[in-house]
Image (spheres, helix red, strand yellow):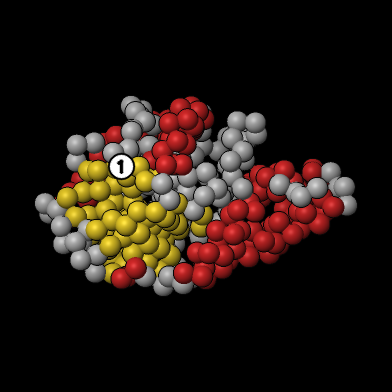
Amino acid sequence: MTEYVLPAPVVQTEGVRELARDLVVIPNRRLQLVPNIGVIGGTHSVLVVETGMGPRNAETVLRFAMEYAQGRRLYLTTTHFHPEHAFGAQVFAGEATFLINKAQAQDLAAKGPGYLAMFRELGEPVARQLEGVELPTPGVVYDTAHDLDLGGRTVRLRATGRAHSRGDQVVTVPDAEVMFTGDLVEAGQFSIFPWFPPHDTDVSATRWITVMRRLAAARPQLVVPGHGDIGGPQLLADVGDYLQLLRDETWRRRDSAMSQETIVEEVSALMIERHPEWEGQEWIARGVGCLCAEHPA
């Protein structure tokens, strides 16, 4: 049996999609471990959202951003600290101001080395992209909310609190009604639960559900997920509905003292039946594990 090897997570700037005036997305083309990357412009500054995995990808993103900016000041932010989203920030040093929320900065410093080691074990193509990674120190750290003036356009950076990670951040462009969610939302994929006890248990399914309700209430017209195709507000509803169903079905079985192994089997079968076209079926079991730990009893 041939062992499956993840393809190289390489950012490509072909097929850039314009969402609004002076606002484009470098799409992930549905490649694993490649995020959707945003470039948002104002009259005097440009904000880049996500770096891609490692220095090589970040260099590609920086070249694109500098050409796009045409002399405007550069800022960089990331939706959370995970490697494909933030482990290229070092490349932007001296070229852009790196700003993130306090909880994300703490995650990057405390968990970054462990995630770097873990991701290097995912295979040679991934390890190659992580060569030379140096975990950065952000230039600006905010608490829970920051409004960034790009010149004629204000971008809202908002920490959500614990959900997919402890330091999740949503980036909203109000005048274009566009929301960048990071891995709080995936399109065509089961929600990614980084539930790795005892090493990392910060993901919270119950908090995640609350966050999704709040994001849906904001009613953005365009939603840029962490991975997968850009969509409308239905993306937020789909993820919220899935997480609630995952909670309800897991807790109902937990109430009956069913073993976690059996819960995983039954709930996985149910979720795959509901969403046979979604990728990432392996994340269902980790979601069940997280919810068993969060069960009120």
Q: Quadrant of residue 203?
A: top right
Residue 3, quarter of the rendered image:
top right
56 sits to left or right of 261: left
- Point out residue 89 in the picture as x, y percentages from the top left corner: 31, 38
Q: Nearer the viewer, residue 163 or 32?
A: 163
Residue at 20%, 45% in the rendered image: 63
Q: Position of residue 24 (x, y in %)?
A: 28, 61
Q: Is residue 105 above or below residue 66?
A: above
Q: Position of residue 18 (x, y in %)?
A: 28, 66
Secondary element type, mark 1: strand
What is the three-letter code of the residue carrying label 1? Val
Q: Name the residue: 88% across, 52% down.
A: 256
Q: Is residue 30 visible?
A: no
Residue shown at the point (71%, 56%) measured from the top left: 247
Q: Residue furthest left?
A: 71
Q: Position of residue 242 (x, y in %)?
A: 64, 61
Viewer-proximal residue, 260 or 202? 202
- Residue 111: tell me if it is visible: yes
Can you identify the residue that label 1 sits on? Answer: 140
Reply above or below: 107 against 208. above
Quadrant location, the N terminus: top right
Count the numbered circles shown: 1
Position above or below: 110 against 187 = above
Which residue reaches farthest front? Answer: 143
Indicate left or right for 58 with 227 as reference.
left
In front of the other: 79 or 227 = 79
Q: Residue at point 64% right, 58% down?
A: 243
Label 1: how many residues lie within 10 Å, few (<14), some (14-19) or many (20+)? few
